[in-house]
Amino acid sequence: MKEQLQTITLGGGCFWCVEAVYERVRGVVAVESGYANGETPNPSYEQVCSGRTGHVEVVRVSFDPAQIGLREILEIFFVVHDPTTLNRQGNDVGTQYRSGIYVHDAEQERVAREVLAEVNAHHGGRVVTELMPERSYTRAEDYHQHYFANHPNQGYCAFVVAPKVAKFQKTFADRVKP
């Protein structure tokens, strides 16, 4: 019997960057940008950007565990963003850009805790990535979905997203979709 797909929710700065990477990972079958773990029901992008909703920009990554495991999904996550900067990634600053792993069950939490501990040790105890259950998820507006694929030459995409995609492709060449 084939294993069912799993979904993990990740916040690693601007969701355009994280989405663009995971859309290229072999074994990932769907990626959706959204907002999670805030207080305002069904927030808009503008509300989240205000920093007053408590939400983080996230991507929901659905993957086939027969092709890629959660540990490898998380290893990619920690390579393509800086887990040591609180509430920022590069020039993107605010609580909506915080680093987070938002789990969907106890087994995901166990694996995530293991990987997080290893990464924290590697970074000398400076990792600020939060780990908690996903809650109050809202799908981002349509224009945010597949943003890099639709706008590769847009300034932010060319100068911020593209280097993260290139780093993934170089570091995990064996995991890039054909």
Image (spheres, helix red, strand yellow):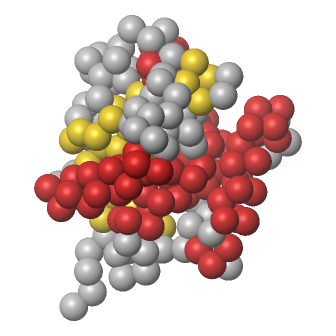
Which is more toward the observer, 166 or 113? 113
Name the outermost residue toward the left: 106
Residue at left offset 36%, top offset 82%: 66
Task: Please say if 156 is above or below 81.
Answer: above
Q: Is residue 167 above or below residue 66?
A: above
Residue 44 location, x and y as percent? 45, 20
Q: Residue 10 location, x and y as percent?
A: 41, 45
Residue 34 can be seen in this image:
no
Q: Quadrant of the N terminus?
A: bottom left
Q: Relative to residue 130, is residue 151 drawn left or right?
A: right
Please tell me in which quadrant of the rendered image residue 61 appears: bottom left
Q: Residue at x 48, y 74 (%)?
A: 27
Tell me if I can see residue 157 in this picture. Answer: yes
Q: How many marks?
A: 0
As drawn, 169 above or below 152: below
Question: Residue at the front extreme?
Answer: 124
Please name the residue shown 43% across and 80% down the image: 67
Q: Viewed as shown, does residue 125 lie left or right of 107? A: right
Give the x, y percent position of residue 6.
Answer: 30, 65
Percent of width and height locating residue 102? 30, 43
- 29 horizontally vs 1: left or right: right
Which image quadrant: the C terminus? Answer: bottom right
Q: Residue at horizontal 57%, vertical 18%?
A: 93
Quarter location, residue 73: bottom left
Query: Along the line of sight, which residue is nearer the eye, 166 or 23?
Result: 166
